Image (cartoon, helix red, strand yellow):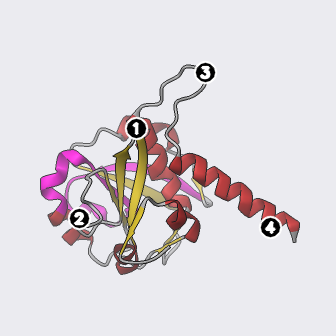
């Protein structure tokens, strides 16, 4: 009985560290915002359930992306027993194998069209566009008080047929369309 409780506490602590804190290392290394965004994208995969399981899990990067180099180090790692792959996409036809889709702020003008492409598909949409969750996206990465945080659109996650863990929802800065 104590072991599952300890495991849950360790998972919560790890999630809190990875998702909520954006503090530079005490050894003088500065973590870039892009590195933090890449870590968020990978960690979100651990706290969302998809309706069908596959042998791989794909993070797709839409358009003019700048996170590819920061995600490259994660490629091939195991996430929930599945191999992580990173791909660039630019059209609706390329989204079929995506579990997570990142739409960068540089593509803000196309967010509405991309969200229509993935409507009701089991794809977790993430962006660093501040209004992303209000516009119908699932998770928005937000810079506040020199920290990187995230907002969650609970309705968008449900519409995609996905389920976010309560741990992730508790760490969100704000939840649109649902409760913690």
- The mark found on residue 93 in the picture is 2
Secondary element under disc 4, as helix, strand or loop, is: helix
Residue furthest left as drawn: 109
Quadrant for residue 81, please give it: bottom right
> In the rendered structure, which disc, 3 or 4, sits on the residue that comes first in sequence?
4
> In the rendered structure, which disc, 1 or 2, sits on the residue that comes first in sequence?
2
Q: Which residue is mark 1?
A: 146
Labels 3, 2: front one? 3
Please tell me how crowded label 3 is: few (under 14), some (14-19), or many (20+) other residues with Cα within 10 Å.
Answer: few
* Separation of residues labelled 1 and 2 (CA atoms): 37 Å
| Closer to us: 107 or 94 | 107
Q: In the rendering, at what x and y percent does residue 99 appear?
A: 41, 64
Q: In the rendering, at what x and y percent does residue 70 appear?
A: 42, 36
> In the rendered structure, which disc, 3 or 2, sits on the residue that comes first in sequence?
3
- The mark found on residue 27 in the picture is 3
Residue 103 within the segment the image draws in magenta: yes
- Against 90, residue 143 (above or below) is above
The answer to whether marks 3 and 2 mark residues whose Cβ atoms lie closer than 8 Å is no
| Closer to us: 89 or 21 | 21
Q: Residue at x 56, y 47 (%)?
A: 18
> In the rendered structure, which disc, 4 or 2, sits on the residue that comes first in sequence?
4
Q: Which residues are magenta?
A: 82-111
Please tell me how crowded label 1 is: few (under 14), some (14-19), or many (20+) other residues with Cα within 10 Å.
Answer: few
Quadrant for residue 175, please give it: bottom left
């Amino acid at each position: 009985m104590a072991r599952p409780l300890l495991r849950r506490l360790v998972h919560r602590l790890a999630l809190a560290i990875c998702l909520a804190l954006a503090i530079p290392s005490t050894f003088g290394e500065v973590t870039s915002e892009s590195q933090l965004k890449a870590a968020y994208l990978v960690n979100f995969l651990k706290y969302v359930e998809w309706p069908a399981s596959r042998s791989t899990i794909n993070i797709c990067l839409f358009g003019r992306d700048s996170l590819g180099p920061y995600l490259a180090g994660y490629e091939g790692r195991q996430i929930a027993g599945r191999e992580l792959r990173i791909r660039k996409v630019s059209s609706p036809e390329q989204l079929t194998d995506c579990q997570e889709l990142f739409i960068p702020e540089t593509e803000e003008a196309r967010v509405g069209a991309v969200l229509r492409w993935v409507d009701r598909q089991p794809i977790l949409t993430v962006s660093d566009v501040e209004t992303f969750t209000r516009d119908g996206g699932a998770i928005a990465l937000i810079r506040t008080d020199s920290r990187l945080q995230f907002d969650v659109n609970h309705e968008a996650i449900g519409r995609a047929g996905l389920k976010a863990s309560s741990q992730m929802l508790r760490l969100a800065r704000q939840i649109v369309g649902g409760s913690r």
